[in-house]
Image (cartoon, coloured by chain):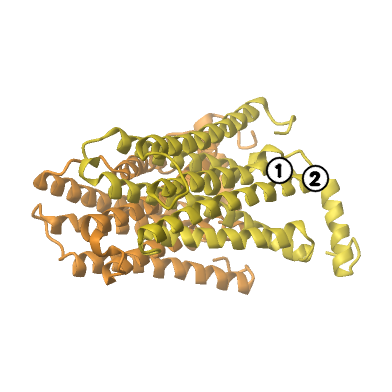
Chain colours: A orange, B yellow
Amino acid sequence: MDESAPRQERLVFAGLVGGTQVLGLASVVLTAVWMGHYRGGFSWDGSSFQFNVHPLCMVLGLVFLQGDAILVYRVFRNEAKRNVKILHGIIHLLALIVSIVGIVAVFDFHRAAKIPDMYSLHSWCGMLTIVLFCVQWVMGLMFFLFPVASSWLRASYLPVHAFCGLVLVVMSIGTSLLGITEKLLFSIMPSYSTFPAEGVLANVLGLVLVLFGVVLCYLITREEFRRPPNPEEESLSVHFKTLTEGGTPDSP
Amino acid sequence: MDESAPRQERLVFAGLVGGTQVLGLASVVLTAVWMGHYRGGFSWDGSSFQFNVHPLCMVLGLVFLQGDAILVYRVFRNEAKRNVKILHGIIHLLALIVSIVGIVAVFDFHRAAKIPDMYSLHSWCGMLTIVLFCVQWVMGLMFFLFPVASSWLRASYLPVHAFCGLVLVVMSIGTSLLGITEKLLFSIMPSYSTFPAEGVLANVLGLVLVLFGVVLCYLITREEFRRPPNPEEESLSVHFKTLTEGGTPDSP
């Protein structure tokens, strides 16, 4: 964060960023423990052990990595904007790859076990989220990394892109919670109401994911944590506009 | 919306507000049809028909009414702020009453059917949401309707209050989706994967709730739909500060 910001504000910012990382890592570890210890571990052979790859990849990719990709704009707010953009795009690409592995894992398992696809609310929300995530990634690449769009169009699209990014993280968390409920009711429905360790662990995982989302959204939406306007970048942007739109640097 | 705003902006605003009302009402109607037609209707006798009151009340109270209570600040942005505050508080009170009826319905049903309480992720998220909703309502009343807090404290708390309001609507929607999944797996697990009408209707209800949340959050967070600053109200606020803190109207 900016060195000129008040000390208390910097401490709150550091605490909140640290909080997201602890909560994000805790959600990945809790998912790994749930699938690894209570559900028998991981493999890639079409069995239920292959299914176990699905929750781990989705929490790691669509929740933790997607959240961190958004957070780079706050954490590296004094770095050159182009570098932060590239980091933002790379972490999103990683998130997409991990998520695709997770989706292939569950479709493969369904095919081997002859379980129908895409009938549950979890699958509907999940598919909607991943399709919109891909659209958002391609649009972001075209608008902000490669100069396909005019600077006016980029400026108009930016708040929509940022809003959609947060919506996608929240949808990913909501879909994860639906997945947790589905998995628990498919696996331990008769004993779930007796508070077994597996049920409590999965419920705690759900609450950790909710808290991760709340702290992340707070960090992203608070005005004082935003990237300060950089006169040099503004000027470069004006020159870019001049080059792409044929105006003069002074034109509005 | 402000008459001076560009015509296109006013049209978009009206379309989005209309969209939230259509989606909110559709979610209430879909829940009523699901519980009324597919789950046998409503009663208050401890049977599963009493359980059916629960989803209807929670979607009406914690989603639709809570969403509309937040929306009044955008829809009546040119009305006197005090009147809008009172309307905001009254709709929230209505939402709270309807939600409490919904919660009593499910606890009563559990007691009669000897089903344990509070073991599922849905119940954990729901209880957290309703407790935080009550805290938010009482805090809002103390800070903004009765002059208990200083104007500095009110100004500092306002963005936190607004952020928490949106978080609570999103948590209510997420909890509703968990409830839909739970109810479907408890009721029609063997046939759910064959796409029965009840399963499809409940899934559609889930998507309508998600869309309601997305449009609502967009309306609330867009800068151009915010309440414009009112010089008269600002001046009154300064005088209020003078009276409560003993300073002069010119003090910072």
**Who's the residue at 50% across and 48% down the image?**
B58
Residue at 88 percent across and 64 percent down: it is B242
- Which residue, as the protein is rendered here, is positioned at the far front? B45
Q: Is residue A48 left or right of residue B173?
A: left
Give the camera-side residue of A173 and B95.
B95
Quadrant of image for the C terminus of chain B: bottom right
| Front-lying residue, B171 or A136 | B171
Residue A76 in view here: no
> What label sits on residue B227 in the rendered view?
1
Which numbered disc covers residue A209?
A: none
Q: Which mark is residue B230?
A: 2
**Is B131 left, or right, of B115 in this rendering?**
right
Q: Residue A224 appears at what percent x and percent y?
A: 61, 60
Distance between the alpha carbons at the discs numbered 2 and 1:
9 Å
**Residue B82, above or below A251:** below
> Which image quarter: residue A10?
bottom right
User: Mark 2 and mark 1, same subunit?
Assistant: yes
Compared across the picture, whether A244 is left or right of A248 comes to: left
Q: Position of residue A28 (x, y in %)?
A: 31, 65
Query: Crowdedness of circle 2 by 10 Å Cα count: few (<14), some, many (20+)?
Result: few
Residue A194, given in percent of the width and then of the height, sits at 30, 68
Assess whether mark 1 and mark 2 are in contact (beta carbons under 8 angstroms). Answer: yes
Amino acid type assigned to the residue bearing label 1 in the image? Arg
